Amino acid sequence: MHAVINIPILYVTHSLDELLRLADRVVLMENGIVKAYDSVEKIWNSPIFAPWKGESEQSSVLALPVHLHNPPYKMTALSLGEQALWIHQVPSNVGERVRVCIYSSDVSITLQKPEKTSIRNILRGQVTQIEIQDARVDLAVLVEGHKIWASISKWAQNE
């Protein structure tokens, strides 16, 4: 709505879903003190926001431009550097940025490129960080300059 009428709107929320859906920029406050002010993507992906996301799962928020649409399959490709990230079709124009939230439990790690799979998003990346939790291992994977989190079991890590 703010883009249509071209005025900023201040919206107060405690809902992370609303934050992702409605906000462009975030003023993060705690006990009346401003802790951070930046884009949703930068705030969400920064360590300062971790207490609000909870400890059960890591996630990454990216704002990527639409590369192309595949109408027969109702899919849209977003440009992730030289790679494509496929999502369900969105009503956005080519070049327009779309925000996506990728949950670490939705990311799989392989040591070889998978073949003959139904998985559409097979991205090349480099593990840059390993965080061992109580029941899982969180891996930060750098993909075309973007950090994407993956959560694997300790069993998978040992293999």
Image (cartoon, rainbow, N blue to C red):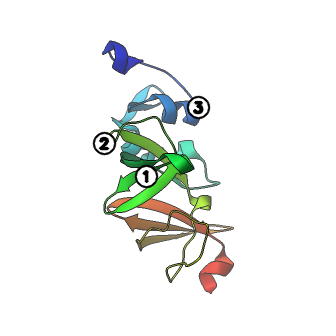
Determine whether label 3 and label 1 are within 8 Å by CB: no
Report the residue marked by disc 3.
15
Of marks 2 and 3, the one in the foreground: 2
In the image, taking residue 47 as reference, residue 54 lies left or right, namely right
Q: Earlier in the sequence, mark 1 or mark 2?
A: 1
Q: CA distance from mark 3 to mark 1?
A: 28 Å
Of marks 3 and 1, the one in the foreground: 1
Q: Quadrant of the N terminus?
A: top left
- The vertical placement of 136 against 72, above or below, is below
Task: Look at the numbered disc 2 and give the secondary structure of its residue.
Answer: loop
The structure residue drawn at horizontal position 55% and vertical position 42%, both measured from the top left corner, is: 52
* Amino acid type at mark 1: Ala
Report the residue marked by disc 2.
95
Residue 78 location (% of width, % of height): 40, 51
Q: Quadrant of residue 138?
A: bottom right
In the image, taking residue 109 as reference, residue 56 lies left or right, namely right
Report the residue marked by disc 1.
77
Determine whether label 2 and label 3 are within 8 Å by CB: no
Q: Earlier in the sequence, mark 2 or mark 3?
A: 3
Residue 50 at least partly seen:
no
- The vertical placement of 3 against 93, above or below, is above
Q: Quadrant of residue 6?
A: top left
Q: CA distance from mark 2 to mark 3?
A: 29 Å
Q: CA distance from mark 1 to mark 2?
A: 11 Å
The answer to which of 107 and 92 lies nearer the viewer is 92
* Amino acid type at mark 3: Ser
* Amino acid type at mark 2: Gly
The structure residue drawn at horizontal position 38% and vertical position 66%, both measured from the top left corner, is: 142
Residue 115 location (% of width, % of height): 55, 79
The structure residue drawn at horizontal position 44% and vertical position 70%, both measured from the top left corner, is: 129
Residue 36 at least partly seen:
yes
